[in-house]
Amino acid sequence: MRANVRKFIVDNFSFGREDVQFSDEESLLEKGLIDSTGVLELVTFLETKYKIHVEDDELIPDNLDSVTKMIRFVNRKSVQEASVAD
Amino acid sequence: MHLDGAKADSRLLRRMMDCVQYRGPDDGGVHVDEEVGLAHVRLSIIDLAGGHQPMQDESGSLSITFNGEIYNYVELRAEWLRKGHRFATQSDTEVILHHYAEKGEACVEDFNGQWAFAIWDKRKRKLFLSRDRVGVRPLFYTLHDRTFLFASEMKSLLAYPGVPRHMDPLGLDQIFTYWSTLPPRTIFRGIQELAPGTSLTIQNGKVETRRYWQLHYPSQGSVRTGPQAERDYADRLMELLVDATRLRLRADVPVGAYLSGGLDSSVIAAVIHQYTDTPLKTFSVTFDDPEFDESPYQKDVSRALGVDRHEVRCTEEAIGQAFPRVIWQTERPVLRTAPAPLFILSRLVRENGYKVVLTGEGSDEMLGGYDIFKEAKIRRFWGARPDSKMRPLLLKKLYPYLPRLQKQSPEYLKAFFSVGEGDLSSPFFSHLPRWKMTSMLKAFFSDGLRAELRREEPAAPLEADLPDDYSRWDPLCQAQYLESAYLLPGYILSSQGDRMAMAHSVEGRFPFLDHRVVEFAATIPPRLKMKALNEKYILKRASESLIPDSVRNRSKQPYRAPEGKCFFSAGKGRDYVEELLDPKRLQKSGLFQPEPVQKLVNKFRSGRAVGIKDNMALVGILSAQLVSDQFVENPGARS
């Protein structure tokens, strides 16, 4: 998942620019990689790719603002949604 | 002007004229006096028979080439006639000569108009150049090989043999920060722009510039308020606007008006209709996409006023097709496609036999209409209580037309518009988010361009250019100043204004930019310009009963145009887009990193690019590539 998420960010936000490197922990906001449209692009990607449903009140930097936060969020959602489905 | 005394060459002057024939297809002329040569292409508007240029005074010691209008020439002429002057023509051009002869360089302080002119004073062997207060008419110059050259457009200077064709890295850096270059810098190294409100003299080989006018606001808290004051301000504003409009209808050809469906152009159309006898024809742009289209409001106004309305529907196809020519006209990169529909609109005006239009430009700057003013007000309000959960939600109210912003959580809104430490005390508080966001696009700059930027002597800090008492002005006035002094001349009046209208030989006239209106608007208390978050409140008050309430009370929709879709369809870019953004062409111009641009292009090809930032990056990179292609790499292809 980490590789896919990173690839999505590179293809869509950083465009592989050499001076825009980011670690898994770094804030996408602070790096200037994401704007209001970017948040929604990101959510659409996560929902489609990982078959989760992101609620409006989950659209917060705590869930989405770094690669690590996203992975944690998607894992948590997948578990929750799987348990609801059960 | 040859500083070494060599005789000016009329053939070269004609070559420079030929490049901008569209600015004056009606007449033309060249005047050579030893080392000085003046040239002129004429769009005949006042004194069609007698206004030929370049023009000499009766003694033959003064010669002028002049682009623009001196609207109060009738009054000035009458004054000189009373004092015994004799005039050979009915033109405003001759009035400038008489006024200069008597008052010298200070003559410009009496002019109400829009101008760029050069006077050759043979007796003093002095060349005098001047540009109007707010920068409606353009004027560029360069010193090359002991020759001083000037022109309305930079392409004329580049047509002179030997003038170097290089992009200026700092000019590009400024556009990718402020959306415009900051005079005297331009996008071409060695070519300078005469700043608005500035005159230049060249005498004995010495070039000097002098700012004769600058926008100025009163210190915070020093203006009169109260209910009576509000009525007085509204009445005086309307009185000045009516007179400014009346003066701008002076022409010996029919005058039309642009009608966008917004408050400003509607007020101008209504003033023409109500206070003058001019039969009015209006011209409008419409779009297929309702996100941009304002035709229902345009129809409301034209119906209410009973005026003719002509429209042109701007398709994405038409914008994409026109864009290379648009950039040939702007002569600089742009970050939005918004100039293109205005290029298409001026063609409609010309096809209808009109060559003069009045528009509402300047109102948003002078009377507080732009969203950036409201955004700054909210950010400042929120910055005072950074922990407030409710205050940032006002930002949603600010941008009702941006659906993606409406979906954001308060946490993200706070992040996007956050007020950083030290921001509140910055003289540029209002503009920091815009400049920061735009600067992010520089991440596409190539290593070579970055290295050049590091080698350049940095431009003087913008702080140095601010008026002395700027820090004592109200924050709204400070923000208005930044919009009026930089973006207005550097983008709105040039890339969207003069260059788009003149491409089809059309002259724009702007009642809100009459200097009396501008100077009066600066004295209006900020709370009457923006009442809470109600923009241009005083203009709405002043125009009660003049225009339909549907238009007067509508929420502001900034003028915008479609972007990415104009350049890409069915998974592919237009031919010129694919060509100019191809890695080989990017390598050749050396401005941007090819691989990241390819990733951006792929995002557009696959239809995934929807945001403002991606669109600005695409338009900025594509237009910079067009400038490089048309003016630097393959200059012969078009010129």
Image (cartoon, coloured by chain):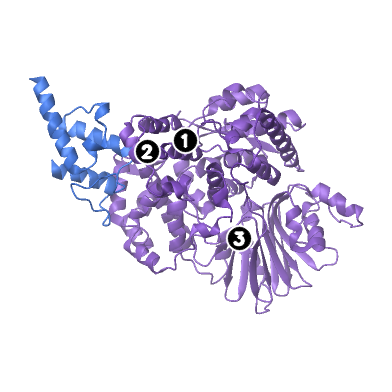
- The disc label shown at residue B194, or none: 3
Subunit bearing disc 1: B
Q: Residue at x 32, y 63 (%)?
A: B447
Subunit bearing disc 2: B
Dot 2 and dot 3 within a common chain: yes
Determine which quarter of the picture holds residue B96. bottom right
Foreground of the two, B478 or A86: B478
Dot 2 and dot 1 within a common chain: yes
Residue type at tag 1: Thr
Label 2 vs 1, first from the N-terminus: 1
- Disc 2 crowd, CA 10 A, few/some/many (<14, 14-19, 20+): some
Foreground of the two, B243 or B313: B243
- Per the image, the residue denoted by label 1 is B315
Label 2 vs 3, first from the N-terminus: 3
Secondary structure beneath disc 1? loop
Label 3 vs 1, first from the N-terminus: 3
